[in-house]
């Protein structure tokens, strides 16, 4: 049995008590982290970060701009050239990153709470993110000293060595929906490979990144190797993306911003641009499934987890028409059990929408869905949660959606499920692939021949068969089409942060 203590919160009251201690007055860091020092933005600007579940101000955070980006880039370059990290042995990097993972583990409740307070996700879900984030750092720490280079199969008179080298300065720009986990997916492999990293967290969720910066210092990361620049995308994010001193942009966020980053790279130094972007993922349910209750539970969780603010949300549910009415009934029943609540209550399945803009955007899509003629079967309204003043929207289900409707094509990034019907496998595959995105797809069936046929035909970076979003650090994560162009997680992610150098040696004759 787990016991509540101040450092091991279990109950709603425990989390509320812990939240009361996380204030700027009590030491919560809200300044930028540049050159091993916490500093105000060069021009002294700040922005307010709010708790979307209560509307309360959490902190006034340093709002970095181009001048801060320039300083951080030159610090990162100096750190890289010094070799203190970039030329350290993989074993030395492993030791520091393992210490960082241990520190994150020791402070996981605090880190999870910061993400929950900053962006509204349930604290129980944020704790799941911490396991993913810590596991990611450990994985890359453990793997970096087990990678070998290659000797090319040339003739005897020469030796072709294939070496893997860090890129230099990596700017990592991340979103707000899984603040610390997305950060870990980027910085784990980037640091393990020997790069200097500048992190730009989302302006909607900067706090856990700043706490992480404190932990990197404690872990012994050399000066200037890791820096954090909070601020807006169009200011400090754009400055990093246009910088001639940045060698790689590692981005997770929307497809629109991903396209801008590619332009910035072209306008500057042709830096490498690694993108993890949006999705509108199809989840295909065939009539041959045995346990429709289980499938319905997963189909609902696939969209309502994290309030639908998930890149791989199963937002398009494609159901064989012969079971559609029965199956949608089961999804509605499951959705009823996934209502939002206070994010600090460990029993809450959903929390608050991240901010007023996102909240309004989701409500606008719901209105548009009704106007376009889809059938609203559940939800659709803003909710008042007792005792909370925040931005809550209940699980929303539209049936009878078609591929011409905005709610059937565009990424809403909220708790809105679009149900389509299909009659044949051919039609299901056509509907699934009829999207600009290709991040994830799900397939539920008992028929192994069908599973093999359909998984091959789905144009998607990942296909979940008889599960949704079962994941592990060892398995690559990423998309095709306008969902992105690289892979987070697993040893494949190291390829994003390193380059091959070939050394051709002619042997003396
Ligand atoms: P966003 O694109 O608005 O912002 C992402 C980051 O980019 C933020 O830090 C933001 O400040 C920065 N940014 C914005 N404009 C910029 C500019 N002009 N130059 C440089 N930086 C800029 O996305 P968001 O709203 O934070 O996150 C939601 C999106 O992220 C969704 O589309 C979601 O699908 C996607 N996402 C994808 C994955 C994945 O792994 N594929 C994971 C999580 C989220």
Image (spheres, helix red, strand yellow):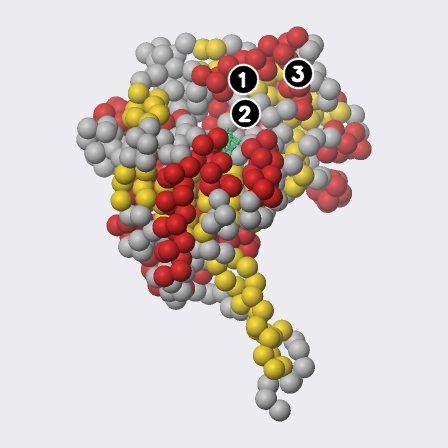
Q: Which residue is labeled 3 in the image?
A: 399
Q: Is the residue indicated by label 2 positioned so its CB lies within 8 Å of ligand 1?
A: yes
Q: Say whether disc 2 or disc 3 marks the residue closer to the N-terminus.
A: 3
Q: Residue furthest left?
A: 26
Work out how far the residue at label 2 is from the one at label 1, CA to CA, in angstroms: 7 Å
For marks 3 and 1, give the one nearer the viewer: 1
On residue 362, the disc is: 1
Residue 30, image x, y percentages:
29, 33
Q: Which residue is mark 2?
A: 413
Mark 2 lies on a secondary structure that is loop
Q: Is residue 140 visible?
A: no
The reply to whether callout 2 and callout 1 are in contact (CB within 8 Å) is: yes
Q: Earlier in the sequence, mark 3 or mark 1?
A: 1
Pointer 2: residues within 10 angstroms few (<14), some, or many (20+)?
Answer: many
Tell me if residue 412 can be seen: yes
Labels 3 & 1 near each other (Cβ < 8 A): no
Q: How many other residues sit within 10 Å of disc 3, few (<14), some (14-19) or many (≥20)?
A: many
Q: Does 261 appear above or below 16? A: below
Residue at image position (49%, 65%) is 147
State the image coordinates of residue 129 (x, y, percent, origin top left): 42, 38
Assign the C terminus to one quadrant of the image.
bottom right
**For marks 2 and 1 on the same chain, the one whose residue lies earlier in the sequence:** 1
Q: What residue is shown at x 61% (from left), y 82% (from top)?
A: 506
Q: Nearer the viewer, residue 76 or 109?
A: 76
- As rendered, which of 270 and 219 lies closer to the eye? 270
> Label 1 crowding class (10 Å Cα cut-off): few <14, some 14-19, many 20+?
many
- Residue at 48% of width from left, 11% of height from top? 382
When the figure is inspected, residue 134 is found, relative to residue 24, above or below; the finding is below
Q: Is mark 3 within 8 Å of ligand 1?
A: no
- Is disc 1 placed on a helix, strand or loop? helix
């Amino acid at each position: 049995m787990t016991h509540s203590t101040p450092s091991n919160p279990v109950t709603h009251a425990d989390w509320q008590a812990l939240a009361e201690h996380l204030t700027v007055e009590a030491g919560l860091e809200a300044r930028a982290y540049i050159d091993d020092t916490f500093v105000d933005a060069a021009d002294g600007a700040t922005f307010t970060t709010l708790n979307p579940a209560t509307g309360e101000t959490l902190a006034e955070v340093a709002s970095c701009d181009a001048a801060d980006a320039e300083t951080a880039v030159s610090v990162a370059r100096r750190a890289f050239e010094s070799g203190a990290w970039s030329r350290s042995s993989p074993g030395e990097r492993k030791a520091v990153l393992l210490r960082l993972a241990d520190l994150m583990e020791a402070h996981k409740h605090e880190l999870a709470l910061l993400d929950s307070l900053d962006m509204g996700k349930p604290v129980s879900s944020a704790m799941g993110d911490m396991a993913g984030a810590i596991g990611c750092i450990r994985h890359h720490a453990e793997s970096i000293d087990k990678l070998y280079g290659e000797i090319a199969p040339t003739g005897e008179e020469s030796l072709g060595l294939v070496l893997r080298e860090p890129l230099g300065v990596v700017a990592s720009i991340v979103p707000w929906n899984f603040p610390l986990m997305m950060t870990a997916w980027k910085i784990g492999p980037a640091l393990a490979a020997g790069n200097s990293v500048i992190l730009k967290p989302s302006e909607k969720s900067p706090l856990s990144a700043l706490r992480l910066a404190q932990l990197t210092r404690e872990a012994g990361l050399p000066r200037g190797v890791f820096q954090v620049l909070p601020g807006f995308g169009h200011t400090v994010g754009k400055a990093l993306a246009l910088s001639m001193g940045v060698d790689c942009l590692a981005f997770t966020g929307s497809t629109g911003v991903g396209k801008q980053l590619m332009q910035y790279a072209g306008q500057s130094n042709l830096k490498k641009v690694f993108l993890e972007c949006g999705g509108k993922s199809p989840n295909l349910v065939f009539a041959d499934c045995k346990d429709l209750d289980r499938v319905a539970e997963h189909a609902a969780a696939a969209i309502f987890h994290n309030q639908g603010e998930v890149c791989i949300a199963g937002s398009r549910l494609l159901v064989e028409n012969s079971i559609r009415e029965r199956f949608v009934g089961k999804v509605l029943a499951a959705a009823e059990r996934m209502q939002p609540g206070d994010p600090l209550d460990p029993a809450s399945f959903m929390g608050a929408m991240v901010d007023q803009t996102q909240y309004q955007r989701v409500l606008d899509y719901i209105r548009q869905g009704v106007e376009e003629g889809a059938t609203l079967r559940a939800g659709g309204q803003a909710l008042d949660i007792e005792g909370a003043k925040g931005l809550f929207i209940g699980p929303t289900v539209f049936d009878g959606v078609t591929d011409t409707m905005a709610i059937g094509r565009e990424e809403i990034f909220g708790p809105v499920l679009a149900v389509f019907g299909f009659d044949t496998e051919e039609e299901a595959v056509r509907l699934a692939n009829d999207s600009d995105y290709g991040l994830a797809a799900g397939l539920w069936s008992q028929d192994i021949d069908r599973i093999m046929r359909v998984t091959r035909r789905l144009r998607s970076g990942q296909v979940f068969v008889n599960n949704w979003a079962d994941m592990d650090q060892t398995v690559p994560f990423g998309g095709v089409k306008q969902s992105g162009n690289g892979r987070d997680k697993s040893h494949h992610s190291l390829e994003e942060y390193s380059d091959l150098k070939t050394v051709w040696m002619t042997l003396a004759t």
